[in-house]
């Protein structure tokens, strides 16, 4: 039986572990509940822990699958794994195929967007709906993202920050949560513990580096995004995010995902799942409702969220 590589607060993360052999490594994932399948994809440097409160709220209503990419969380990367988003996308595809997951709702944020949309544009007939938070799926064009990539994923400063200081897990995650009272010692430990050594921290450097290095791969995904135009989507956007995800990026998604409903959260930053797990759960419920045999029609209403109040504009 596989053992957890580190301990995590059981009251926060009370889930049974599942392990999928992947080459000579393993993909750790959570599989909770029964019913419609919801696949929850994380970004950098997070893991399935990011979705713990969403899973706890929804496990009585659907089946929630939350994997850790190889090198993240409790997963063990196979030999020769480079931690690139392309490889993570292949791992997620393998998980979906091995578990024979059908008619899935994809929930994506940060790098989970490109990773998830790599699958979605190739298997759109198996995607029931989309819940999207502060993400992108195209080559970086705005200056903040380019600068972020050059700094956090650069050499030698970025490499030193990530591998020697565990900077992403130690500093950027707490900084990307708007509700500072939620940044507890248990939360900090859960995000830093997966990366105890410089070698094991390399994945957190490859991701920001890939904002620039994976340009052709991102462009290929972007070229296929119109295939998803008619899939019902919930866009949930943290307006306090300063990590290169301004409202203009949200509006770009609104133009691509024509079947969208949108909530812009004035009290959420980059890690929306930490700031407003209740709204993430509500968005998943909503997309399940919308795809439960209801007739499809394009959405023409944009929504904005002020605290917990939704206002049509």
Image: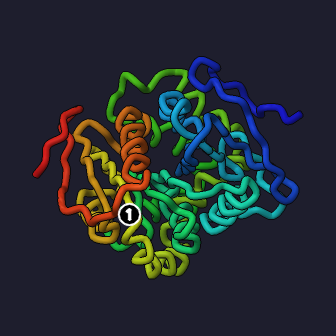
Q: Is residue 236 visible in this depiction of the protein?
A: yes
Closer-to-camera residue (80/117)? 117
Question: Which percent across, then down, holds residue 217?
Answer: 55, 77
Quadrant where the N terminus is found in the figure: top right
Using residue 302 as the reference point, say whether residue 127 is left or right of it.
right
Q: Residues within 10 Å of mark 1 (few under 14, many from 20)?
A: some
Question: Which percent across, then down, holds residue 80?
Answer: 81, 64
Using residue 228 as the reference point, say whether residue 268 is left or right of it.
left
Q: Is residue 275 visible in this depiction of the protein?
A: no
At a point 19% along the width and 62% down the height, the residue shown is 300
Using residue 4 as the reference point, say whether residue 266 is left or right of it.
left
Question: Which percent across, then down, holds residue 171?
Answer: 47, 38
Question: In the picture, residue 5 is in which quadrant?
Answer: top right
Q: Secondary structure at mark 1?
A: helix
Using residue 79 as the reference point, say whether residue 176 is left or right of it.
left
Question: Which percent across, then down, holds residue 290?
Answer: 37, 52
At a point 61% along the width and 44% down the height, the residue shown is 66
**Measured along the vertical axis of the image, is residue 110 above or below residue 89?**
above
Closer-to-camera residue (270/66)? 66
Closer-to-camera residue (89/270)? 89
The residue singled out by tag 1 in the image is 145
């Amino acid at each position: 039986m596989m053992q957890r590589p580190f301990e995590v607060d059981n009251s926060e993360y009370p889930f049974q572990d599942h392990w999928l052999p992947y080459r000579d490594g393993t993909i750790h994932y959570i599989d909770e509940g029964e019913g419609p399948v919801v696949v929850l994809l994380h970004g950098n440097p997070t893991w399935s822990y990011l979705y713990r409160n969403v899973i706890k709220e929804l496990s009585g209503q659907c089946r929630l699958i939350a994997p850790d990419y190889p090198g993240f969380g409790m997963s063990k990367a196979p030999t020769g794994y480079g931690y690139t988003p392309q490889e993570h996308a292949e791992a997620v595809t393998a998980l979906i195929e091995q578990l024979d997951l059908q008619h899935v709702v994809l929930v994506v944020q940060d790098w989970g967007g490109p990773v998830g949309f790599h699958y979605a544009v190739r298997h759109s007939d198996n995607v029931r709906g989309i819940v999207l938070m502060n993400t992108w799926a195209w080559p970086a064009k705005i200056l903040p993202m380019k600068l972020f990539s050059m700094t956090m994923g650069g050499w030698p400063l970025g490499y030193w920050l990530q591998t020697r200081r565990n900077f992403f897990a130690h500093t950027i995650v707490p900084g990307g949560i708007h509700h500072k009272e939620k940044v507890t010692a248990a939360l900090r430990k859960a995000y830093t513990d997966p990366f105890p050594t410089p070698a094991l921290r390399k994945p957190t450097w490859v991701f920001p580096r890939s904002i620039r290095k994976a340009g052709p791969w991102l462009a290929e995904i972007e070229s296929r995004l119109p295939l998803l135009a008619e899939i019902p989507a919930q866009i949930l956007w943290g307006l306090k995010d300063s990590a290169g995800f301004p409202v203009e990026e949200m509006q770009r998604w609104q133009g691509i995902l024509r079947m969208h409903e949108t909530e812009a959260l004035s009290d959420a930053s980059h890690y929306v799942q930490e700031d407003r797990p209740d709204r993430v759960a509500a968005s998943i419920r909503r997309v399940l409702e919308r795809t439960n045999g209801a007739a499809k029609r394009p959405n023409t209403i944009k929504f904005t969220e002020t605290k917990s109040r939704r206002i049509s504009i």
